[in-house]
Amino acid sequence: MLKAFIFSVVTFSCTTLMVQAQQKKALFIIVDGIPADVIEKQPTPHLHNIAKAGGYTRAYVGGEKDGYSQTPTISAVGYNSLLTGTWVNKHNVWDNDIAAQNYSYGSIFRFFKQAYPQKKTAVFSSWLDNRTKLVGDGLPQTGNLKIDYHVDGLEKDTARFPHDKDSWYMHLIDEAVVDSAADYIRKQAPDLSWVYLEYTDDMGHRYGDSEKFYAAINMMDDQVGRIWNALEYRRKNFGEDWQLFITTDHGRTASNGKGHGGQSDRERTTWMVTNAKGLNDYFKTGQPGIVDILPTMARFLQINIPQADARELDGAPLTGKVSLTQPGATLDNGALHLTWKAREKKGNVKVWVTTTNNFKTGGQDTYKLLGEVPLQQEHAEISVKDMPSGFYKVVMEGPDNTVNRWVGKQ
């Protein structure tokens, strides 16, 4: 009897530990306005430690330069490209005013809550609009999505954080945001979280490429280190599996580093640091976009994104198998000429086409399967003479992911 009892206790304990070990949690941090050439030259020991656990890569924002998805290299625009996995032609946040966001394109928080309504989310931000507008906390347009815990809006608390001419108050706000995030993660471990820090961008605007800008980056690295320590505490003491992404929303102008918003290489070139396991060739050699973080976290968290939404995503996972990236499409003489970069050797690409964009206004698009070609072929010519139109949405579906292109004017 005693042996049976001991066996039962051991079995229960082992089962409990296995359940804990299977708990997957994700956190992404946006640190504002740091171009890749600067982050690569600064001593950032905490970012380096995180990269040792996963990886570092140069990345990009701004959509396709001179193409239909060209996206301003502006803060809120970049945040929303990460949140929705789409460029501005879809999410419609063109500047920091966030005047007419298209909530038809769901955020990682919406997809997560739809899949796991019982799990917990959190936002820690030095800018209130990130939660109230971009995430759309409590808005009918997001299905009354509710963020379970948040610390933000401190920029409006001028009693606690009086606004000084040198913007030191923003550093103090970032400090409060980080302290709150690290403490809450240690104690409560929300399942999906976003941390946003602003001070680096303020120093970039004010001083450009300068020692004050670099000092702000060093402070940011220390802040990220405190959050990383909280994740490590949870991993070591609770057996949780955490995926962390740190990135920036835009680079800076080449002339002096004070501005951003355009399509110069330095404004478009950003970076990612992650502890993610199983980083693929696309992450390592493909210079991924900010839109690739959503599908990566969704894969890690095992979020089943509805097919209609998945077909709109402009990114591809940075971990595990990816069939194809870098889609291209043109229309000539009644045929779609399609190209892509094959990331795997086996399998086929299914080509789905629709002439409507009802998704944009909350409706449905009916796709037709017009062809299937070998993945390694990396090109296809698909006749659309039987469905003449001035606009086509094309989805190229591989065994492991889909990519999409628009052709014509919408």
Image (spheres, grey):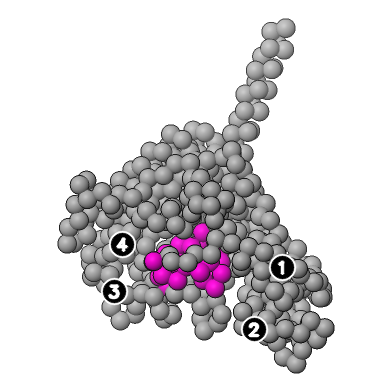
Q: CA distance from mark 3 to mark 1?
A: 43 Å
Q: Nearer the viewer, mark 1 or mark 4?
A: 1
Local crowd at mark 4 within 10 Å, few (<14), some, or many (≥20)?
many
Q: Earlier in the sequence, mark 4 or mark 2?
A: 4
Q: In which image quadrant can residue 408 be found?
A: bottom right
Q: Amino acid at mark 2?
A: Gly
**Disc 1 target residue:** 365
Separation (CA) of disc 1 from disc 4: 42 Å
Farthest residue, direction front: 140
Q: Are marks 3 and 4 in contact (CB under 8 Å)?
A: no
**Crowding near the residue tagged with mark 3, few <14, some 14–19, many ≥20 C-alpha atoms within 10 Å:** many
Asked if one can make out residue 128 in the rendered structure from this viewpoint, the answer is: yes
Could you tell me residue 13's position as x and y percent? Answer: 62, 24
The residues bearing labels 2 and 1 have C-alpha atoms spaced at a distance of 17 Å
Q: CA distance from mark 3 to mark 2?
A: 36 Å
Q: Amino acid at mark 1?
A: Asp
Q: Assess whether mark 4 and mark 1 are in contact (beta carbons under 8 angstroms).
A: no
Judged from this view, the residue extending furthest toward the top is 1
> Disc 4 marks which residue?
200
**Which residue appears at 48% of the width and 74% of the height?**
71
Mark 3 or mark 4, earlier in chain:
4
Magenta range: 73-97
Question: As rendered, which of 323 and 295 lies closer to the eye?
Answer: 295
Chain-order first, disc 2 or disc 1: 1
Give the numbered dot on residue 194.
none
- Tell which tag, 3 or 1, sits nearer the viewer: 1
What residue would you read off at disc 2? 408
Q: Secondary structure at mark 2?
A: strand
> Mark 3: which amino acid?
Lys
Question: Residue 139 at what x, y percent from top left?
Answer: 50, 52
